[in-house]
Image (spheres, helix red, strand yellow):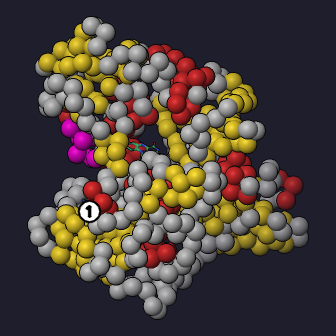
Amino acid sequence: MAENQNQPAGPDLALGVSPGDFKNDMLLGHFGDQDVLVVRAGSEIFAIDAHCSHYHGPLADGLVTGHDIRCPWHHACFDLRTGEAVRAPALSPLSVWKVEQRQGRIFVTQKQEAPKAKRAPSDAPRRIVIVGGGAAGFAAAEMLRRDGYGGEIAMLSSDSAPPVDRPNLSKDYLAGSAPEDWVPLRPESFYAESKIDLKLSTNVASIDAKARNVTLADGKTLPYDRLLLATGAEPVRLPTPGADQKHVHVLRSLDDCRAIIANAKDAKRAIVIGASFIGLEAAAALRARDIEVHVVAPEQRPMERILGPDMGDFVRALHEEHGVIFHLGDTVAGIDGKRATLKSGGRLEADLVVVGVGVRPRLALAEQAGLSTDRGVTVNAYLETSAPGIFAAGDIARWPDPHSKDNIRVEHWVVAQRQGQTAARNMLGAREVFDAVPFFWSQHYDVPINYVGHAEKWDEIAIDGDIKGRDCVLRYKQKGRVLAVASIYRDVDSLKAAVAMEQA
Ligand SMILES: Cc1cc2nc3c(=O)[nH]c(=O)nc-3n(C[C@H](O)[C@H](O)[C@H](O)COP(=O)(O)OP(=O)(O)OC[C@H]3O[C@@H](n4cnc5c(N)ncnc54)[C@H](O)[C@@H]3O)c2cc1C
Ligand code: FES
């Protein structure tokens, strides 16, 4: 993923460059041994780390909007003046450098000092409890501290591991191409240093919205002034006979992923049940481990409901090129040891089965606490639930999306993180509307699919470019209005589509 870091990029920026050398208002060079991107934003010139702090995406291929630069790969956004990661999925800031203009040339002179720590409002609540140690919960805790919140933060997670980069669990880590130290969002020391009281393997049993406390499964209670509910979703488990055996897995947590990897070590054949994003990403990862993979799913085309028929055909062909064998229009009727029987009557042998048939939002706590729910926890534009002081974010939250003008709930990593960040600021009293355009990405072998917006249905898909050639933009339209845009290797178009939706 990273470009060659040993060779410094472009010209030595300490020696100065000419404004005429800029391309698309950007110029990639180096300062000392660091790759630095010089950016023209209106009449101002900035210099910033050339690589995104998420997965090292090349910012030179991104998009400048106002005083921000957006990463081409997963749409993180950095403030060019301070380097702050203002939009997830990047959470860590980038370095910025001082720039001088002399005799018609531009010189990078020295690294700028890190901006001063922020201060939370003096009337900030004393105790914040976050239920969930996933994308939304972690992003909220991190943002609270970044915004200078000095009160107590307790993060309660039923996971046994500190917050992880969940998308990696169906991609590089599962494929064996990423080491385990890529998986935690932060090292364990971060929590103590940031005074975040992270309680792992801790189940919250109930919330008393009137008394403002939560009760843990072991009976202990914890008071809060503000609560963030970020319990995410859980994989749907199949009622199929035999689906409770040890070699039949779901994939949500690091523990799930480790169990699949352990099983994969001596597996020769695998069945993936479900042709969803996670199912097919898992199929690709298992192929990378040289395991024969059969995908069984009831639909006729993978991902057609979300991406349409042409992209569905492309995804199927892509997986077939890599040796995946599809059994579409079929389901697994039973699993007896290593033998799976299909509804069509066919039989498959498998040492390993991964079930990826969708997830259900974890609503039990919200329902028990008497919060309004509607196929998700209902929140307002500030991500506050029907109970004052309780906010919700991530896979459980159904929010009023100003772009689709609908109340929507999605299962996207970046949306969960951004909601966590907005909820954090709103728990401190900011009253910030959550208006981010939904974004997700999915990776199959070397092909990334990016998606912005939200289209549950459409009456037209306008295809620009060549899907098979892996160079395309698909616009999902309803009555001529673009609701969502999917793309392959058209990163700037994807970023521009997000900006256009923000401004619509
Ligand atoms: C393998 C995998 C790959 C993915 N890849 C992508 C991708 O490429 N792109 C993308 O956009 N999205 C992807 N997603 C989806 C994305 O990870 C989710 O949308 C995101 O994690 C949702 O964040 P969340 O905070 O709402 O929930 P989660 O991240 O699931 O976190 C929920 C947390 O709540 C805790 N919890 C639940 N109930 C309780 C309780 N009662 N008490 C205490 N703690 C509780 C859980 O233990 C967990 O820590 C992927 C998901 C998976 C599983
Ligand atoms: S690499 Fe930049 S957002 Fe992921």
Q: Residue at x 39, y 58 (%)?
A: 373
Which region is colored magenta? 253-260
Q: Residue at x 22, y 77 (%)?
A: 222
Q: Is residue 259 magenta?
A: yes
Tag 1 residue? 368
Q: Where is residue 340? Give x, y as percent.
A: 22, 16
Q: Where is residue 433? Give x, y as percent.
A: 58, 68
Quick check: is the Cβ at mark 1 less than 8 Å away from ligand 1?
A: no
Q: Is residue 168 left or right of residue 399?
A: left
Outermost residue to the left: 218
What type of secondary structure mainly makes up the magenta span?
helix
Query: In the picture, residue 394 is in which quadrant?
Result: bottom left
Tally of numbered tags = 1
Asked whether the viewer can see residue 175, the reply is no
Give the vertical position of 12 relative to 478 (above or below). below
Q: Where is residue 478? Give x, y as percent.
A: 69, 38
Query: In the picture, residue 485 is in which quadrant?
Result: top right
Asked whether the viewer can see residue 371, the reply is yes
Give the vertical position of 258 relative to 469 (above or below). below
Label 1 sits on a secondary structure element that is: helix
Give the vertical position of 42 relative to 123 (above or below). above
Amino acid type at image mark 1: Gln
Q: Is residue 270 magenta?
A: no
Q: Where is residue 1? Give x, y as percent.
A: 51, 41
Front in this rendered view, residue 465 or 184: 465
Q: How many C-alpha atoms fall within 10 Å of the one at disc 1: few (<14), some, or many (≥20)?
A: few
